[in-house]
Image (cartoon, rainbow, N blue to C red):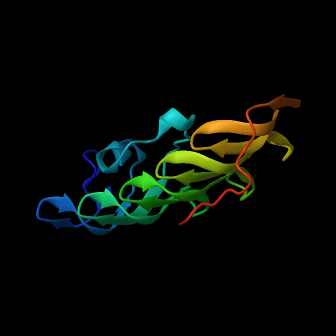
Amino acid sequence: MAPEDDTRLVMDLNLLDGLFHGPYTIYDPELYYIAGPLRMDRGAIVIEEGMWESGRFDRGLKTGMVRISYGDGTLFRSVNHQTDKWHGTLLEFRKNGELTLQASFVNDEMHGFFESYWLNDEILRSGYYDRGKRCGTWFDYGNNNEYDSCPEKFRVDS
């Protein structure tokens, strides 16, 4: 329950042997840190009143698809987890449903396609990562930048 309002639920989760286990929902963004880091090492995260996160724990580790939604239920972020690490495609959306970022991860490391967009939907950044390092040609803020060549094929198993 919320300390300022004992009628408001802030987390819905289960424990197994003292570990988070099974489906969960966190209704108070300030409590996200309890269930895992905000991943701010990958850039700023937008937290607004009313946002909520839902997903699944397997013996204390986030597993499967985790979704963060705006208060009205519109999806803000979705990303797959394997043993508490980002693995697969991460998508972020604006409140109006427009895609603002897409990135691929393998074992918590950027690997594969990445693209982010300005508010007018023009591309802000676009390129590929090879195990956490930029590779090939990147489009950055209107400029093309060259990095070491990329592997011929990118594959993200999710």
Query: Outermost residue toward the bottom?
Result: 22
Q: Tell me where residue 89 appears, x and y as whole percent.
A: 60, 58
Q: Tell me where residue 39 appears, x and y as whole percent.
A: 47, 40
Residue 74 in view of the camera: yes
Instruction: Name the residue: 52% across, 45% down.
Output: 109
Instruction: Name the residue: 11% across, 64% down.
Output: 17
Give the camera-side residue of 28 and 35.
35
Which image quadrant is residue 148 in?
top right
Instruction: Name the residue: 71% across, 38% down.
Output: 135
Q: Is residue 22 left or right of residue 112?
A: left
Q: Is residue 94 left or right of residue 58?
A: right
| 88 in relation to 5, above or below | below
| 32 in relation to 13, above or below | above
Give the camera-side residue of 2 and 74.
74
- The quarter in which the N terminus is drawn is bottom left
Which image quadrant is residue 70 in?
bottom right
Q: Tell me where residue 36 appears, x and y as whole percent.
A: 35, 47
Residue 8 in view of the camera: no
